[in-house]
Image: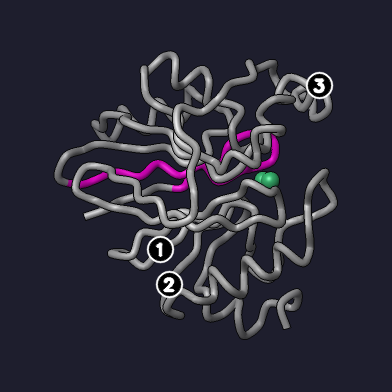
Amino acid sequence: MLKYQVIPVTAYQQNCSLLWCDQTKQAALIDPGGDIDLLFEEIKKNQLELAQIWLTHGHLDHVGGTDEIARTKKVPIIGPHEDDFFWLDILQQQCEMFNFPKVNNFTPDQWLNEGDKLTLGKETFEILHTPGHTPGHIVIVHHASKTVWVGDVLFKQSIGRTDFPKGSHEALIASIKNKLFALPDDYQFVPGHGPGGSLKDEALHNPFLR
Ligand SMILES: [Zn+2]
Ligand SMILES: [Zn+2]
């Protein structure tokens, strides 16, 4: 069975998720934006072995801890889609802009594409490419638990910003309606900030999607 814990990190209270396969204790971090000591503590507390880092998109509050964790734990960096390379390529600049501790630019070990599968212990996940907030944004679907990690695509009663370079409001709305809302409507989502909820509630009540 898949277990997970949401751990808000950085001044932006970005929802890093620690996921693990109950049987094998293999773990992955989704969007480790920072506060590495806190993340390592939770890994240790649950007696897990960190195996992979998965990234939804290239924004600093989602990826800031990645390079250091990958080097310390010798684990691969997987995702986002290659169209977010330009964000990862200016991480140092983002640190100055957002007053973050300095981090190194890095290149993931593997880019992700629509339909790709990820494996963590006995659990499998499906990738959907969901551009709009950033062009290379991906979401991670775990069908067995009906859960989808959506990064900054969709929030409870809100949607992701699109006023960044290469952002697109039209693309974002299309990603939400054609990809997320195409999933069965009893799926839950875990967003990059704030509380999650059910996709069905957002389809019915999200004021940005009517
Ligand atoms: Zn973002
Ligand atoms: Zn964010």
Residue 86 picture location, percent across and down: 71, 32
Asked whether residue 18 is drawn in magenta, I would say yes
Q: Decide if residue 126 is on the left or right side of residue 104.
A: left
Numbered label attached to residue 147: 1
* Label 1 close to label 2 by CB (< 8 Å): yes
* Label 1 close to label 3 by CB (< 8 Å): no
Q: Secondary structure at mark 2?
A: loop
> For the point 42% across and 37% down, which residue is it?
29
Q: Label 3, on which residue?
A: 96
> For the point 51% across and 54% down, which residue is it?
139
Front residue (pair 103, 5)? 103
Question: Which three-letter amino acid code belongs to the residue tagged 3?
Answer: Glu
Circle 2 crowding by C-alpha within 10 Å: few under 14, some 14–19, many from 20? some
Asked whether residue 16 is drawn in magenta, I would say yes
Dominant SS of magenta comes to: strand
Numbered label attached to residue 77: none
Numbered label attached to residue 187: 2
Question: Which three-letter amino acid code belongs to the residue tagged 1?
Answer: Thr
Circle 3 crowding by C-alpha within 10 Å: few under 14, some 14–19, many from 20? few
